[in-house]
Image (cartoon, rainbow, N blue to C red):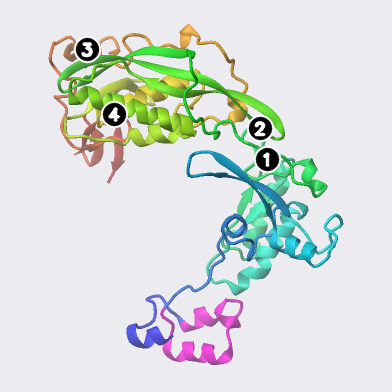
Amino acid sequence: MELTKERGAFALFDTASYLKAGTFASRLPEDIKEAIRRDGIRNSHLLSNAPTGTVSLAFADNASNGIEPAFSWTYTRMKVMADGGRESFDVEDYAYRLYRELGGDVTRLPDYFVSALEMSARDHLDMMAAVQPYVDTSISKTVNVPADYPFEAFESLYFDAWKSGLKGLATYRPNETLGAVLSVSPAQADDTLAESDLDPLRIAIDHRPKGELPAIIEKVEYLTQAGKKSLYVAVSFIEVTGRLGGEDVTIERPIEFFIPTGQRDESQQWITATMRSLSLAARGGFVARNLQDMRKVSWDRGQVRLGEVQRLDGHRTPRWHDSEVAALAFAIQQILHRRGFLDAEGNQVPSRLLARLPRGQMKAETALSADFGIRPAPADAHTAELTQPGVMPGLHTMLGRKCGSCGANAVIRKDGCDFCTACGEVGACG
């Protein structure tokens, strides 16, 4: 309100609406409400409830869970150390620990110790509804929904939240495919710390094992402004065993990426450096994210053609990348996709699904054909360009913005619509 005297009230301020019965402001002390009636208020919104369950546990030693009930009274958290290794830590809820230190019997906790999993979805919603009248923005809180919760009841949660005056509702329901972000094993129900799950995708591998490793070797050909280039990509795999849901789970993970090349010039050295960095990312357990970052790398040497894009009408057009780094990242994503390690968009497939894939065999049918990425369809407009030595396909397209479909910098304005002169994709009009 002091800021209002200096800079004025917020643009949409209306005294009657802001102070009407049932609003957050209507519950303020009378002297403050009178000042708002007289001068207005500078900030349209003042309070919100941030998600505090995991934050308070991990960083604030359980100083306050805020509006989030404790997920469990005891946890085992796995922390990645500076050397890349992992170390587990036993963590206790603050109230639980204080109760024990004061002489309480933690094997039989009082009824007022209620965890998130002991509350029904309706209880979570009612808690938010009780607090919302005192918060003028919204509440960020997880409503835990059991895996076997009926769909009809789940659907009604959102409608009931709206009727209760909530401005938002975040629900979380675990499932067998993706598992759960946090879980409590049956052993923890007996107030003992259970052995922590350790996703085999997240286990850090210190170094490459000695000896030979099973690998996929594929030939990749792509087109640049300097002409066609080809190279071989080798991806080595290793079996990694972790624990999910209290059970041992074994998957195959890529551990090493290698492209045989010389070291004589700069253009070859960047390939070697890139593959070494990608191998380190694979051993650290974040190869999918690293490949996605590589797809964003651009340079000033013109776009690179590799792969194809299939439009909704079934027509296949070339795919364009902003650099050779981005093109190679796409090629490797496709290799790992056919292996079942990544999905079609380059996202990581969960360990639970990877564990169902056959292991210990590098099937020939997963290999790319030698003409991968440069297959023009019969009677395709690009066919003639491909048959002309030294001609870079796409040189006859008009330069413009980047196309979200094929990646070419060829989107222009045509007949009032966005139009890609490389693949023919039509975008927003108006």
Question: Residue type at mark 4?
Answer: Val
Q: Where is residue 151 in the image (x, y as percent from the top left)?
A: 70, 43
Chain-order first, disc 2 or disc 3: 2
Q: What stretch is highlighted in magenta?
A: 15-42
Give the spatial CA distance, label 2 vs label 4.
35 Å
Chain-order first, disc 3 or disc 4: 4
Residues at circles 3 and 1 in contact by the CB criterion of under 8 Å = no
Question: Residue type at mark 2?
Answer: Arg
Residues at circles 1 and 2 in contact by the CB criterion of under 8 Å = yes
Q: Where is residue 103 in the image (x, y as percent from the top left)?
A: 83, 65
Q: Name the residue under label 1.
A: 196
Task: Return the mark for residue 293.
Answer: none
Q: Name the residue under label 4.
A: 325
Residues at circles 2 and 3 in contact by the CB criterion of under 8 Å = no
Query: Toward which corner of the image does residue 124 lie, by quadrant?
Result: bottom right
Residue nearest the viewer, comparing 362 with 88: 88
Q: In this view, does 4 lie to the left or right of 379?
A: right
Query: Disc 3 or disc 1, which is closer to the eye?
Result: 1
Query: Disc 2 or disc 4, which is closer to the eye?
Result: 2
Question: Residue type at mark 3?
Answer: Thr
